[in-house]
Image: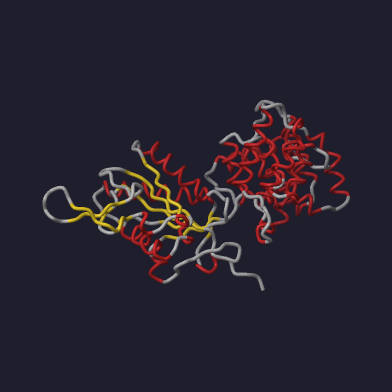
């Protein structure tokens, strides 16, 4: 019997990391706008849960930056690490005498407790459930009352806590009573190769990391190695691999240091994943890269025909998944003369590939498209590409489009 996943235990939905970022950002903007309209709605404390290295902590930096840009006010970011703090790091237990001769006392609060009147910010509690119980009790007050003891946070501050799932892979110390669970809105993020690729392309990751994950989207996270206690690939480690590749490329070239690279990145993504990645880098293996299907179909035509001839549907399926991820994340450009009845070379390659694969492999393309946000640029890109090919290729129309329509019937 398989182990119940943490989001199933909590009985909550799952979402991509980008979706969670937008949900939280839009909620904060909505709260501020509702206040401006004269209705004093409560702030919402969020609890982001997901596997290590998926980008949970990083999206808080993005939220603060984007809110600052979109709202025209500085959104500060205060991030604390619960496992290395105690309750006394927040509030000094020894009161001091006020300077106003009132013979009363005031408490001392830590520098990382927001105090500036009229300020805006996000207070992030990283690894909340790995803090000790006395700290967690204080942090419950932070999340429920936006306060530490009697000190209220400035009204423009919002609270987000971040955790790994509470399952056998992680060592957690949760306080899961009913009162604790009700204080937060819980959002569970699953691993998404597409989210990673969009982020990687936007931030100019090394092209070999981008192309590798586009070719093998399932390699974005190595859950098997993680469960076995080994070094494991994850979005954060792939970002580090990208950084190392850039350093080598700038300092003499990747191939010059390939042996050193192999040793170094095995410490980030493990030996097995590194072997596959090095084969990809050096093109020693018979790997069909998605961008080659688009840019130079003749180069991979024979390899694809061999997969079809040998009925290697598993590899064809993986190839179709990778090709679709390449299209929706890179959205490669192509020349399309609207006055011409001929397909350009790039679209011709796409048409040939989608027309020649078995119908169950072609169906992967359609089902993948169904999961893309209909309002996104990626969806518009695929629909436009499909439309351009449909107008100019009867074979594509018959073997891909019509075949899929008949299959669904």
How is the structure coloured here? secondary structure
Could you say which is closer to the camera, residue 174 or residue 63?
Answer: 174
Question: Toward which corner of the image does residue 286 lie, by quadrant?
Answer: top right
- Rendering coords of residue 278 (x, y %): 76, 41
8 versus 72 height, above or below: below
Who's the residue at 56% across and 36% down the image? 202
| Count of all numbered marks drawn on residues in the image | 0
- Rendering coords of residue 56 (x, y %): 51, 51
Question: Toward which corner of the image does residue 245 lie, by quadrant?
Answer: top right
149 versus 292 height, above or below: below
- Rendering coords of residue 275 (x, y %): 77, 46
Which corner quadrant holds the N terminus? bottom right
Question: Toward which corner of the image does residue 376 lie, by quadrant?
Answer: top right
Could you say which is closer to the camera, residue 9 or residue 344?
Answer: 9
Could you say which is closer to the camera, residue 298 or residue 20?
Answer: 20
Q: In the displayed structure, does residue 224 sit left or right of residue 14?
A: right
Furthest-bottom residue in this view: 1
Who's the residue at 38% across and 57% down the image? 45
Could you say which is closer to the camera, residue 394 or residue 298?
Answer: 298
Who's the residue at 36% across and 48% down the image? 112
253 versus 188 height, above or below: above
Which corner quadrant holds the C terminus? bottom right
Q: In the displayed structure, does residue 226 sit left or right of residue 297?
A: left
- Rendering coords of residue 276 (x, y %): 76, 46
């Amino acid at each position: 019997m398989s182990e119940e996943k943490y989001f199933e235990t909590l009985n909550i939905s799952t979402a991509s990391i980008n979706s969670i970022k937008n949900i939280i950002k839009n909620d904060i903007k909505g709260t501020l706008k509702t206040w401006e309209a004269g209705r004093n709605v409560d702030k919402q404390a969020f609890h982001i849960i997901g596997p290590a290295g998926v980008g949970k902590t990083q999206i808080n930096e993005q939220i603060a930056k984007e809110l600052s840009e979109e709202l025209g006010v500085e959104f500060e970011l205060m991030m604390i690490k619960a496992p290395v703090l105690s309750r006394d790091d927040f509030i000094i237990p020894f009161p001091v005498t006020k300077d106003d001769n009132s013979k009363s006392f005031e408490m001392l609060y830590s520098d990382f407790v927001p105090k500036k009147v009229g300020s805006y910010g996000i207070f992030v509690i990283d690894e909340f459930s790995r803090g000790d119980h006395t700290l967690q009790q204080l942090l419950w007050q932070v999340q429920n009352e936006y306060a530490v003891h009697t000190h209220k946070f400035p009204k423009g501050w919002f609270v987000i806590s971040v955790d790994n799932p509470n399952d056998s892979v992680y060592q957690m110390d949760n306080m899961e009573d009913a009162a604790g669970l009700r204080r937060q809105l819980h959002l569970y993020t699953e691993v998404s190769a597409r989210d990673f690729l969009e982020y990687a392309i936007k931030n100019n990751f090394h092209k070999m990391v981008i192309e590798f994950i586009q070719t093998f989207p399932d390699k974005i996270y190595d859950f098997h190695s993680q469960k076995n206690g080994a070094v494991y690939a994850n979005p954060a480690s792939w970002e580090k691999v990208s950084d190392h590749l850039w350093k080598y490329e700038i300092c003499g070239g990747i191939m010059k240091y390939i042996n050193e690279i192999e040793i170094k990145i095995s410490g980030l993504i493990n030996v097995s994943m590194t072997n596959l990645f090095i084969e990809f880098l050096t093109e020693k293996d018979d790997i069909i890269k998605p961008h080659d299907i688009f840019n130079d179909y003749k180069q991979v035509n024979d390899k694809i025909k061999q997969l079809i001839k040998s009925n290697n549907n598993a590899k064809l399926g993986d190839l179709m998944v990778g090709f679709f991820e390449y299209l929706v994340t890179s959205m490669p450009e192509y020349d399309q003369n609207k006055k011409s009845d001929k397909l350009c070379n790039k679209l011709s390659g796409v048409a040939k590939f989608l027309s020649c694969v078995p119908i169950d492999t072609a169906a992967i393309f359609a089902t993948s498209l169904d999961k893309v946000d209909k309002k996104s640029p990626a969806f518009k890109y695929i629909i436009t590409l499909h439309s351009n090919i449909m107008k100019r290729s009867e074979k594509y129309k018959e073997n891909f489009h019509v075949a899929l329509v008949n299959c669904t019937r």
